[in-house]
Amino acid sequence: MHLSSITAGALALAPQLASAHFLFPHLMLNGVKTEAYEYVREHDFGFNPHKTDWINSEDFRCNEGSWNHRNDPKTAEVTAGQDVVGFNLHLDFAIYHPGPVTIYLSKAPGDVREYDGSGDWFKVYQLGTQIPWNGTDQGWLTWDQKNFQFTLPNEIPAGEYLMRIEQMSVHQPYREKEWYVQCAHLKIASSYDGPDPSPTIKFPGGYNINDEAIQLDSWAQPPPTYAAMPGPEQWPN
Ligand SMILES: *[C@@H]1O[C@H](CO)[C@@H](O)[C@H](O)[C@H]1NC(C)=O
Ligand SMILES: [Cu+2]
């Protein structure tokens, strides 16, 4: 199934590859791993990866079938500029497909449980390669990590939000990518009243097959020494 599983780096992790891919069911809240799906919207696609052209689907927002689960999670109450939030992988899994992790926020018009993610998204977190990158799987800062968290910036208007994590796996040949996406429910308290977070994108539409990040050829010889991040610049910028 995965050609990369025959490469040296992935061999040691073959049992994981055989059993499943990955999910992000745990919200991280000030260093605490919350229960699976306590604050995260489940979806109906399980561990399965999506392929490159998924970027053009509405399901690229929060994954297939997630709308069916919109009333299940609680909404985590957090404060901008103060609380540390993020995601943890399922069980004790860690990322074993090389590639960037990004996290976006999108403000719901009202109750986040009734929000489908069709509005504007801005990026608040990203983790790519070491710089300079030696072109290996181990050179990704996401490699073998299970926990992705950051302090919420001050510069976020108060409101309810979808927080979306995305991992883009770059191990496939021919510039093919795999995607893992999941969303959490946040209610952000904030006294910020500056300009709206920017730049923003929509899902779908914000990613294009020709984007430098998606065109990365991790099988190139000599190996690539730079990997562009998917999506726009991070906020605040
Ligand atoms: C590339 O960098 C990673 C991370 O520092 C290291 O673990 C790995 O051994 C390096 N590989 C090569 C071939 O330089
Ligand atoms: Cu895979």
Image (spheres, rainbow, N blue to C red):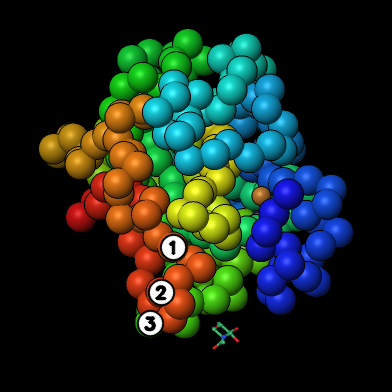
The disc placed on residue 224 is 2
Residue kind at label 3, given as amino acid type: Pro
| Local secondary structure at mark 1 | loop
Q: Comparing marks 3 and 2, which lies closer to the viewer?
A: 2
Occupied quadrant, residue 160: top left
- Label annotation for residue 217: 1
Give the image quarter of residue 92: bottom right
Q: Position of residue 53 (x, y in %)?
A: 45, 34
Asked if the beta carbon under badge 1 is closer than 8 A to the nearest atom of ligand 2, the reply is: no
Residue 56 percent location from the top left of the image: 40, 28
**x%, y% of residue 43?**
65, 25
The residue drawn where x is 68% and y is 59% is 3
Q: What's the residue type where badge 1 is placed?
A: Asp
- Look at label 2 and name its amino acid: Pro
Of the residues under marks 3 and 1, which one precedes in the sequence?
3
Q: Nearer the viewer, residue 222 or 139?
A: 222
